[in-house]
Image (spheres, coloured by chain):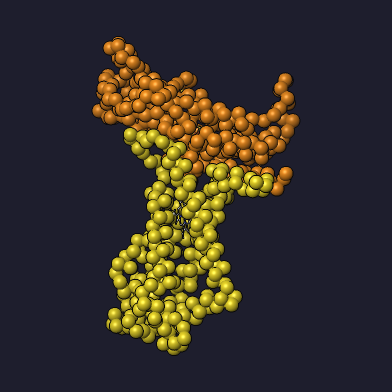
Chain colours: A orange, B yellow
Amino acid sequence: MNLTLKVWRQSSPNATGRIETYEAKNIPSEASFLEMLDIVNEGIIESGGDPIHFDHDCREGICGACSLAINGVPHSKESGITTCQVHMRKFREGDTIWIEPFRARAFPVIKDLIVDRSAFDRIIAAGGFIDVRTGSAPEANAIPIGKEDADTSFDAATCIGCGACVAACKNASAMLFVGAKAAHLNILPQGHTEKDHRVLAMVRQMDAEGFGNCTNQYECEAVCPKEISADVISKLNRDYAAAAVREAVAD
Amino acid sequence: MNSLGKTLLRFWNSSIGKKLIVAITGLMLVGFLLGHMAGNLLIFQGREDLNDYAEFLHHMLHGWGIWFARIGILGAFVLHIVATVSLVQQNRAARDSRYSCDATVQAPTSSRIMIWSGLTVIAFVIFHIFHFTVRLDPDLAAMKDPSDPARHDVYGMVIAGFQNPLVVLFYIVAISLLCSHLSHGIASVFQTLGLRTVKTRVAIRNLGLGIAVLLWIGFLSIPFLVAVGALEEPATPAAASAPVIEAAKS
Ligand code: HEM
Ligand code: SF4
Ligand code: FES
């Protein structure tokens, strides 16, 4: 296949970026999207240029490292997959493809298509955990958990922290990520004890990082590679309201 | 500042807290709109019923009632505007760089023009209050109910007010944008309040659309029927076929 790529190039965090055009020639249609970039990069390196920098790791849709907005849509317009799972057969001969970094003030560009997503780590550090005694693992079935709760919690737990929800949101809001991480733990008995503290701390950290506010447009759930539903946002709103009221009257 | 004050300030400054305020004030305004529309529709019952209703509004609780209602509505309106303008500013700042190739996957247009539909509503509300509440136009202000000259003729004023095509045009545009606002806004309230779940999702969406359409039909039916002459004197169904224009000036 022969394609035209419009790629965001930015040499460092403070440099001004710009779109540059590349011709991707003789790309096998069975190549993955990232393999296509590898091929283009080989050409750039051979001609002495600076290769296009992008994030990747597992290349099988489980780690959350790959990013990229492909034609304006994080992880491409194919639903339920990550960028590393996109294949070139989804494009047509002669297509022009726009490749940009995930855009959000809270995700500053490091270089080219690589953005700094450590804001997510700080949100997790604020409350996305449970306090347990470390050591030998407790007996798995010691605390009975209803099937429905286990399923809902697991659905939320499938979030791989990729940040596509932020990148797709018109307001760069992190509510789907935070909602998923909070719901995952809040639903389970192990996480229930620290629920109020968790929700307040995670939302405050989210706000402090400069993410936007949710306007209930659900662009996030449309691009989420794990198809996490915006219901987790509704639950986060509910849990936050309850926690804020309890906090206001408690001390 | 005392600790309750601090808690309230923190709530206002949080993304979710401010959204909750938008949702609750939005809901109050929707409640007002439904009541206002129901009241307006009394125009189809004729001059007497509409003017009775207007008189009742001005005299309930010895004349205090309408001021309580006005202060409540104004308070909700101002809070809604202050909160949404602040949210919009924060949201623009949060997405400080734009995609060169911009795409929208599923957000409906109504949800993307909330600030513009809202700002049109502000302009409309100001115009509407000067038009029908303050009555800047001396002709409209001077209209008296023929059967009880001591009271204002709201019925005649509405019909006369809608003779101006520019007024009608602005009314149609503003109400349509308001209903666009609500086609997203009402369903949105349930999500913000945490009531939207797998079970309620579809019902909530339809409820929001349903109320928006109901308000649109209810509010616009009045200028429409004035235009086709269905509301001419005497205000009985027989008048629907009567010739137009003249009675408006009565
Ligand atoms: C009769 C007047 C109005 C009614 C009934 C109304 C109703 C609503 C409702 C129900 C919502 C959804 C709240 C939520 O997301 O939970 C909303 C959102 C919104 N309103 Fe209004 N509104 C009115 C006037 C205005 C005005 C005058 C503005 C002008 C600034 C405005 C701007 C907005 C914006 C920007 C949002 C989206 C907020 C967000 O999602 O973050 N509205 N409105
Ligand atoms: S919620 Fe979905 S889109 Fe957002 S970080 Fe998690 S996996 Fe990625
Ligand atoms: S590289 Fe691991 S999910 Fe794409």
- Residue at the extreme bottom of the image, as rendered: B147
| Residue under the point 54% across and 64% down | B71
Residue A8: quarter of image: top left
The reply to whether residue B129 is visible in this rendering is: yes
The reply to whether residue A225 is visible in this rendering is: no
| Residue under the point 72% across and 20% down | A135
Pick the quarter of the image with the C terminus of chain B: bottom left
Q: Which of B122 and A175 is in front in this view?
A: B122
Residue A86's x, y, as percent? 39, 27
Say left or right for B247 vs A203: left
Residue A168's x, y, as percent? 43, 37
Total count of labels: 0
| Residue under the point 39% across and 31% down | A69
Say left or right for A73 vs A206: left
| Residue under the point 46% across and 83% down | B151
Residue B139's x, y, as percent? 35, 79
- Residue at the extreme front of the image, as rendered: B1
Q: Nearer the viewer, residue A72 or B164?
A: B164
Q: Which of A238 and B92 is in front in this view?
A: B92
A92 versus B127 height, above or below? above
B117 versus A154 height, above or below? below
Residue B141's x, y, as percent? 40, 78
Residue A186: quarter of image: top right
